[in-house]
């Protein structure tokens, strides 16, 4: 098996990392845990994606989300992705397949436990590791997750109260 | 609730405007006209009105949907996917810069922030001296500027700046930096601050409520949700024979399979910088001197956030009303890159995705939003010899990509701009300042901020860099060697093709560009109208 170091080197050499991701993504998906997020009627996200996003999102946002908030968030991410041009959707698919795969999770994200049972500390270390990585590819993977999760959460009016954000009174009649 | 206000678009549709929605087309369409205009933004809107007024049969073809005030419900969740290119998530090839551009009828003018600046005299002088565009003298341009200002109702904004903008004004006063108030293209503005989501009151005098209704009233036709794929060229590559478009489904992304073919005496490209050069590239337009798509500029923007003791509510009130040109005039125009300071509107999605960091730190900053001031610096690219901008390329599905490497002088300007913004924010009384960079932490004094900024790594995907001003890529040149078009926007090789949009500019403008686009559009479309009629 290729080591993480080798993988990163090939990645640097071009888009070989993404090719490898496609290869890695085929076998061996993480076992899914039966949870509230399964059986969601999403257009883009599959069960493996919702499983991993449900684990990452609260850590990314720094918020604890109840089951309904989590569902709303996953629908939001799904909607955000389906609004992207098809070429960008394909890139998001590669990223999610890479992370959803056991090897990708273990060797690229550095998360040992399956997503649904990974500790907050482990998830935090993964996000911070990618955010501050010296490889632009990993930094861009982090930024994609950051963008999607934040856009999905803060587009939802349910998030506004915590920010004291609201449309000014005279604007409300226009909504 | 539906809006109690009039909606000029819905009224026009009931009056019987000739409007096609690509998503509703079930069979291929063939149309004939005098002038086909691709793109309905600043350049396309003005051109449509001028040419329709001259009695020409005009067809306006727009990739985005036709949305209007009734649809604008002050929600980011609806605005970004519906009204922006790539859901407001367009990025440069290496993902280093996020680009905001409109994709709707009215183009970027439907979602822009209404700041109105004349094309700077020093920029026009540079174009005359260094780009050989000697025709663009001040006496030539001034009447067109005045006409453009009148057309979109540009005037002084008399209401006091909102607290977010006041921070810039206070900081500049304290430090003795020159500053001023920004003029706006509005009429009976409610001072709400939602210009970026489409103006719900029709106060903003965008193309959507001015020139486009006027052109449609004069018999022009509009095709929305039709993406122009390519121009069909004559065998000798000297002439555009037809314009070929793909009807899009209701998602405004996926082609439905229905094709649109338009025959026109003349074709005007107004797809905006990135969109226009990409269409020329897809069409295999002649480019003997390899200038097409090159020198595309962004006014790359870096940002600084500050927690203020007072209530700011940066989402409320007219978005950009104060500016400082102090750092545009500090160095020679082709020396160290200068920058213009402004204050953007701040709404939850825009803020959350732009802010760096994650987890509880990020959540706390979000919750501090009512006290948050955000400042931005627009760097003036395209004048320094090592600031050549970016190159428009095509992805494998033919969609555009901008390859914009951030070169050393641009990075140096970013560092300098972060310093200026932190200094200004502290001078205005900030409790803490956060440079928007993944390696920065909130600093509680100007000295602390400066030390931090001096060591921030200058790398993409660490520094947050954004842009809402795309310019160039099909530039005017004094001859075919140096440009894609001449100073009238006429293509050097194709005899019935003009470019009339922001892609004309041979450098960045050095000010928010909408009024410059309107000005050139009025001038060049008027010339075209007299040529054709
Ligand atoms: C959020 C935001 C805020 C801004 N704020 C300000 C401001 O305050 N002041 C200021 O001066 N400027 C501002 N700008 C910039 C300004 O609006 C633009 O510079 C100006 O509108 C550019 O005009 P244009 O004609 O080149 O392109 P656009 O106005 O962008 O119009 C291009 C249109 O062409 C369409 N198109 C592209 N390709 C195709 C195709 N192949 N087929 C069919 N249609 C196509 C696009 O969908 C788009 O609608 C802002 C821009 C944005 C996005
Ligand atoms: S601030 Fe004025 S122009 Fe902007 S959206 Fe509100 S009413 Fe319209």
Image: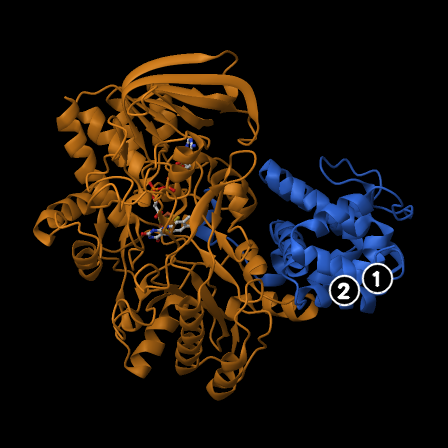
**Chain letter for the blue colouring in the rendering:** A
| SS assignment at label 1 | loop
- The answer to which image quadrant residue B202 occupies is top left
Q: How crowded is mark 2: few (under 14 residues within 10 Å), some or many (20 or more)?
A: some
Residue behind mark 2? A126
Question: Would residue B225 appear left or right of B470 to someone viewing this image?
Answer: right
Q: Chain B is drawn in which colour?
A: orange
Residue in the picture at 64% in, 40% down = A89
Residue A62 shows in this picture: no
Question: Would residue B411 appear left or right of B172 to someone viewing this image?
Answer: right
Image spot of residue A109 (x, y percent):
78, 60
Q: How crowded is mark 1: few (under 14 residues within 10 Å), some or many (20 or more)?
A: many
Image spot of residue A111 (x, y percent):
84, 62
B209 or B249, which is in the foreground?
B249
Which callout, 2 or 1, points at the residue further toward the start of the chain? 1
Dot 1 beta carbon under 8 Å from ligand 1 = no
For the residues beneath circles 2 and 1, the answer to whether they share a chain is yes
Look at the picture and state if B393 lies above or below B251: below
Residue in the picture at 63% in, 49% down = A156
Q: Mark 2 lies on which chain?
A: A
Image spot of residue B48 (x, y percent):
27, 29
Question: Colour mode?
Answer: by chain
Point out which mark residue A111 bears.
1
- The answer to which image quadrant residue B53 occupies is top left
Q: Mark 1 lies on which chain?
A: A
B407 or B426, which is in the foreground?
B407
Marks 2 and 1, how far apart at CA: 7 Å
């Amino acid at each position: 098996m290729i080591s993480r170091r080798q993988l990163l080197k090939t990645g640097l050499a071009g888009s070989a990392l993404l090719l490898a991701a496609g290869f890695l993504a085929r076998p061996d998906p993480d076992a899914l845990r039966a949870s509230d997020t399964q059986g969601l009627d999403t257009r883009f996200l599959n069960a493996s994606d919702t499983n991993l996003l449900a684990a990452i999102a609260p850590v990314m946002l720094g918020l604890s989300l109840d089951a309904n908030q989590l569902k709303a968030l996953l629908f939001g991410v799904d909607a955000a992705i389906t609004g992207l041009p098809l070429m960008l959707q394909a890139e998001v698919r590669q990223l999610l397949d890479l992370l959803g795969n056991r090897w990708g999770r273990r060797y690229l994200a550095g998360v040992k436990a399956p997503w649904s049972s990974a500790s907050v500390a482990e998830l935090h270390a993964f996000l911070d590791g990618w955010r501050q990585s010296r490889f632009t590819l990993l930094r861009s993977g982090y930024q994609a997750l950051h963008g999607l999760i934040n856009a999905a959460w803060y587009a939802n009016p349910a998030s506004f109260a915590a920010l004291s954000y609201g449309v000014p009174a005279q604007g409300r009649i226009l909504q | 609730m539906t809006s109690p206000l009039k909606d000029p678009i819905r009224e026009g549709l009931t009056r019987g405007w000739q409007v096609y929605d690509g998503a509703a087309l079930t069979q291929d369409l063939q149309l004939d006209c005098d002038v086909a205009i691709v793109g309905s933004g600043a350049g396309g809107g003005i051109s449509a009105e001028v040419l329709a007024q001259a009695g020409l049969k005009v067809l306006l073809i727009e990739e985005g949907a036709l949305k209007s005030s009734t649809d604008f419900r002050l929600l980011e969740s609806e605005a970004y996917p519906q009204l922006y290119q790539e859901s407001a998530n367009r990025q440069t090839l290496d993902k280093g810069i996020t680009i905001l551009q409109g994709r709707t009828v009215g183009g970027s003018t439907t979602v822009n922030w209404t700041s109105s600046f004349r094309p700077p005299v020093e920029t026009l002088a540079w174009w005359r001296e260094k780009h050989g565009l000697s025709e663009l003298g001040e006496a030539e341009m001034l009447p067109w500027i005045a006409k453009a200002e009148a057309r979109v109702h540009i005037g002084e904004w008399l209401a006091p700046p909102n607290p977010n903008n006041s921070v810039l004004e206070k900081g500049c006063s304290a430090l003795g930096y020159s500053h001023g108030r920004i003029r706006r293209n509005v009429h009976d503005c409610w001072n709400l601050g939602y210009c970026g989501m489409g103006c719900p009151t029709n106060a903003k005098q965008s193309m959507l409520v001015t020139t486009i209704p006027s052109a449609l009233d004069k018999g022009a036709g509009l095709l929305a949700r039709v993406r122009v794929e390519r121009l069909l060229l004559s065998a000798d590559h000297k002439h555009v024979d037809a314009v070929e478009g793909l009807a899009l489904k209701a998602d405004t992304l996926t082609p439905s399979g229905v094709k649109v073919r338009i025959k026109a005496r003349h074709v005007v490209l107004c797809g905006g910088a990135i969109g226009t050069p990409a269409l020329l590239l897809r069409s295999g337009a002649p480019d003997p001197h390899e200038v097409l798509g090159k020198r595309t500029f962004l006014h790359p923007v870096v940002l600084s956030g500050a927690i203020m003791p007072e209530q700011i509510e940066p989402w409320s009130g007219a978005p950009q009303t104060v500016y400082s040109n102090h750092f545009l005039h500090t160095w020679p125009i082709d020396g160290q890159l200068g920058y213009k300071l402004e204050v953007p509107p701040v709404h939850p999605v825009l803020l959350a995705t732009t802010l760096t960091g994650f987890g509880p730190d990020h959540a706390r900053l979000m919750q501090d939003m009512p006290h948050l001031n955000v400042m931005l610096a627009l760097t003036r690219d395209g004048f320094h010899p090592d600031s050549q901008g970016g190159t428009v390329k095509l992805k494998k599905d033919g969609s555009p990509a901008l390859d914009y490497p951030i070169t050393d002088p641009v990075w140096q300007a970013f560092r300098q701009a972060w310093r200026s913004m932190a200094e200004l924010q502290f001078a205005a009384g900030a409790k803490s300042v956060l440079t928007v960079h993944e390696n920065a932490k909130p600093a509680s004094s100007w000295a602390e901020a400066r030390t931090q900024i001096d060591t921030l790594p200058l790398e993409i995907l660490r520094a947050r860099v954004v842009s809402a001003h795309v310019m160039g890529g099909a530039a005017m040149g004094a001859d075919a060697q140096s440009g894609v078009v001449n100073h009238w926007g006429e293509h050097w090789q194709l005899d019935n093709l003009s470019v009339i949009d922001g892609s004309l500019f041979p450098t960045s403008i050095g000010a928010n560009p909408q009024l410059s686009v309107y000005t050139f559009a009025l001038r060049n479309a008027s010339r075209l109208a007299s040529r054709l009629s």
